[in-house]
Image (cartoon, rainbow, N blue to C red):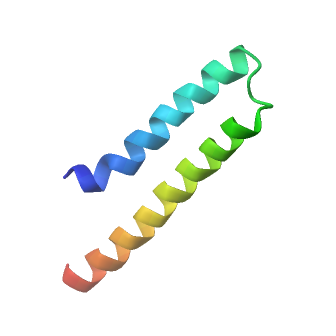
Amino acid sequence: MYAIVGPYVLLAAIAVALLVAVNRDLISTIQFRIMMIGAAVLALAWSVFLGAVWREYG
């Protein structure tokens, strides 16, 4: 169960961090951009992986 929702929880946490970063003008830092892109790629890759496994075993 945690494997399914884990990346989405991470993406939601990063979205909250994005709101804080915009309010504090931290959005221009490269570390924050890397973190946002990494979280989005992880969630997308995990969705594709789960979709492939679900089709094979579902």
Q: Position of residue 40 (x, y in %)?
A: 56, 51
In the displayed structure, 23 sits above or below 46; it is above
Report the number of discs: 0
Residue with the most extreme bottom position = 56
**In the image, is 9 to the left or to the right of 37?**
left
**In the image, is 48 to the left or to the right of 6?**
right
Q: Quadrant of the C terminus?
A: bottom left
In the displayed structure, 48 sits above or below 24; it is below
Q: Residue at x 71, y 14 (%)?
A: 24
Q: Position of residue 47 (x, y in %)?
A: 42, 63
Q: Residue at x 61, y 43 (%)?
A: 35
Q: Residue at x 31, y 49 (%)?
A: 5
Q: Position of residue 7 (x, y in %)?
A: 40, 50
In the displayed structure, 19 sits above or below 9; it is above
**In the image, is 13 to the left or to the right of 55?**
right
Residue with the most extreme front position = 31
Q: Residue at x 70, y 15 (%)?
A: 23
In the displayed structure, 23 sits above or below 37; it is above
Residue with the most extreme top position = 24
